[in-house]
Amino acid sequence: MENGYYKAINWNQVSDEIDKATWEKLTEQFWLDTRIPVSNDMDDWRTLDDDHKWVVGHVFGGLTLLDTLQSQDGMAALRRDVRTPHETAVLNNIQFMESVHAKSYSTIFETLNTPDEIDEIFDWSDSEDLLQNKAKRIYTLYHDDGNPLKKKISSVFLETFLFYSGFYTPLYYLGHNKLNNVAEIIKLILRDESVHGTYIGYKFQLAMKDLTDNQQQELKDWMYDFLYYLYDNEEKYTHLVYDRVGWADDVLKFIRYNANKALMNLGQEPLFPEGAEDVNPVVMNGISTSTSNHDFFSQVGNGYRLGNVEAMDDNDYKI
Ligand SMILES: [Fe+2]
Ligand SMILES: [Fe+2]
């Protein structure tokens, strides 16, 4: 409401061009989980032993929880602090895609796991302390309307840092040319998250400029403390999930590298010494070899083009 009147959104008067560019980018790279043929990965899946299957199932359980948090609380929280009506529209788009992300893990489970295994994975993600710690801490920040910048920091840390302990597994298999369709879903998610993290980080940097020097310093101190807290929890979580396959140290390098990227999205200096050259090259290969592309202003990946999608007809509505 403005001066007692409700305002219609006008896309021919856009005060922040980044809103428009992000809207175009996100709508261009729209995708759905149901279009990826995950069942083609069954032969690869059968070659994995029980421990490696456990890791795949449970990292996706963890990712489901975090994407649920983004779709149910995160974007609604950020939408209360927008600077422009177009930002609201972008956040609406992001919120729906977070629901697609959260659902897509269920599409993977449905193909790879038995009903009992799926129940066990959800019981685990709904109760595992190290996973719940991060979800609850961020949930609390999302519901604290007195701190709009802390909400943005939480969202960027979640998407550019906390997701990567889970993303490691499908990228590792993709680098070994295994579970390619599962990995394609993850890469589509990663491509979205990359835009979300950049966009929300950008809005954070705009809001940061409105603060006094003292307020900025105070917020920076809080940000690095929060990152240490999350990293400490993430280190324990990584051991909990990965010790059974001996990958924990390698995963930790990867998440430190991504923690630095999260700080960069927020306009801050990196904290950890890790650069791209320190990450397992198989995983970096997994990021770069697939058809999808996760750079912000790049084109839609070859692996999924809107043009390949069949239009719906009346038969689609006969259930
Ligand atoms: Fe997501
Ligand atoms: Fe996201």
Image (tube, rainbow, N blue to C red):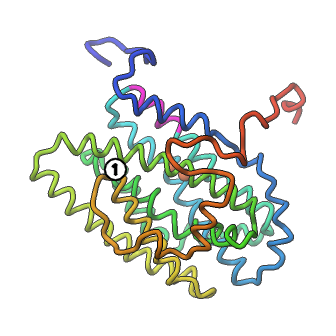
Circle 1 Cα neighbour tier, 10 Å, few/some/many (<14 / 14–19 / ≥20): many
Q: Name the residue: 69% across, 61% down.
A: 183
The question of residue 86 being in magenta is answered with yes
- Please state the extent of the stretch shown in magenta in the rendering: 85-93
Left or right: 116 as drawn, with respect to 299: right
Taken as a whole, is the magenta stretch helix, strand or loop?
helix
Is the residue 289 above or below the residue 239 in the image? above
* Residue 142 seen in render: yes
Disc 1 within 8 angstroms of ligand 2 (CB): no
- Measuring from the top left, give residue 187's x and y in whole percent: 63, 56
Tell me how many marks there are.
1
Q: Name the residue: 29% across, 12% down.
A: 4
Is the residue 318 above or below the residue 101 in the image? above
Between 303 and 14, which is closer to the camera in this rendering?
A: 303
Q: Name the residue: 36% across, 48% down.
A: 201
Q: In which quarter of the image is the N terminus?
A: top left
Left or right: 30 as drawn, with respect to 274: right
- Residue 112 falls in which quadrant of the image? bottom right
- Residue 179 falls in which quadrant of the image? bottom right
The question of residue 308 being in magenta is answered with no
Residue, disc 1: 151
- Measuring from the top left, give residue 52's x and y in whole percent: 70, 80
Is the residue 278 above or below the residue 66 in the image? below
- Measuring from the top left, give residue 77's x and y in whole percent: 39, 43
- Measuring from the top left, give residue 91's x and y in whole percent: 46, 37
| Secondary structure at numbered mark 1 | helix
* Residue 129 seen in render: no
Q: Name the residue: 37% across, 77% down.
A: 232
Is the residue 219 above or below the residue 59 in the image? above
| Residue type beneath disc 1 | Lys
Left or right: 252 as drawn, with respect to 286: left
